Image (cartoon, rainbow, N blue to C red):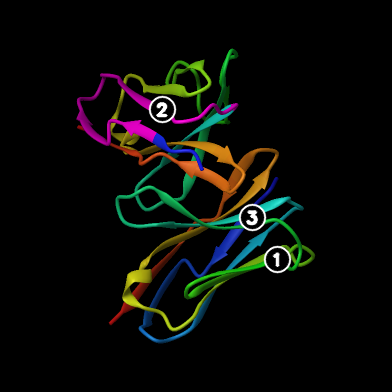
Amino acid sequence: ELKVEQNPLFLSMQEGKNYTIYCNYSTTSDRLYWYRQDPGKSLESLFVLLSNGAVKQEGRLMASLDTKARLSTLHITAAVHDLSATYFCAVDSNYQLIWGAGTKLIIKP
Amino acid sequence: SAVISQKPSRDICQRGTSLTIQCQVDSQVTMMFWYRQQPGQSLTLIATANQGSEATYESGFVIDKFPISRPNLTFSTLTVSNMSPEDSSIYLCSVDQPGGYTFGSGTRLTVV
């Protein structure tokens, strides 16, 4: 059974700091996704990672994938308040997305 | 990427009644997915809907409780039947796109 473990589940940090969210999964997969969800809203796609060593960056967010370690990271650089949200990773397994539990990120001004 | 219009955005329903949620996609897609997100939780796949065939339900979800229609390649409905307070959740539809899965805006359902 494919499992996706995300940590931490909750993160409170100050603006300007750096931090990393980790996503471990239990079996091989072709695609890994990162999504953002604001309270009461739907999910916004951030990154799709397709191959080992893939690195993608958008603004202050950078995602990477290590398929050998079955690990993806979402790194936040110099956090700003607007990045406060819940972040989910999800792994594609035969056209089914298996979701991590989510990381609730609060960035304090 | 595809744009999904999901209706209603929210509703408050009496227990024992049913609610039908609609998703309209602006392009033809083979598979549509229906998810439930309970308060403060991650997403759980309810079923996968292909046009012209019965939906495939995940463990813990049954057709009598969550009937799904998929009359064409751009539209699908999910009905939450005989609702109880435990059905209070956000329900989301989704389609697979080259750039990743795209989600509808969600339906926030409260059962009282």
Which residue is at a point 38% across and 47% down the rendered structure image?
Answer: A42
In the rendered structure, the residue with mark 2 lies on which chain? B
A59 vs B110, left or right, is: right
Percent from the top left, x then y, of residue A41?
33, 50
Badge 2 marks a residue whose secondary structure is strand
Badge 1 marks a residue whose secondary structure is loop
Residue annotated with mark 3: A32
- Evaluate whether label 1 is on the same chain as label 3: yes
Segment tinted magenta in the rendering: B5-30
Please identify the residue farthest to the right as the structure is shown.
A68
In the rendered structure, the residue with mark 1 lies on which chain? A
Q: Are marks 1 and 3 in contact (CB under 8 Å)?
A: no
Tell me, for residue A54, which label it has, or none: 1
Please identify the residue farthest to the bottom as the structure is shown.
A16
Q: Which amino acid is tagged 2?
A: Gln
Q: Where does the N terminus of chain A fall, quadrant-wise?
A: top right
A28 up-or-down from B44: above or below: below
Q: Nearer the viewer, residue B9 or B56?
A: B9
A27 vs B36, left or right, is: right
Residue annotated with mark 2: B24
Q: Residues within 10 Å of mark 1 (few under 14, many from 20)?
A: some
Which of pointers 1 and 3 lies earlier in the amino acid sequence? 3
- Evaluate whether label 1 is on the same chain as label 2: no
Q: Quadrant of residue B5?
A: top left
The nearer-to-camera label among 2 and 3 is 2
In the rendered structure, the residue with mark 3 lies on which chain? A
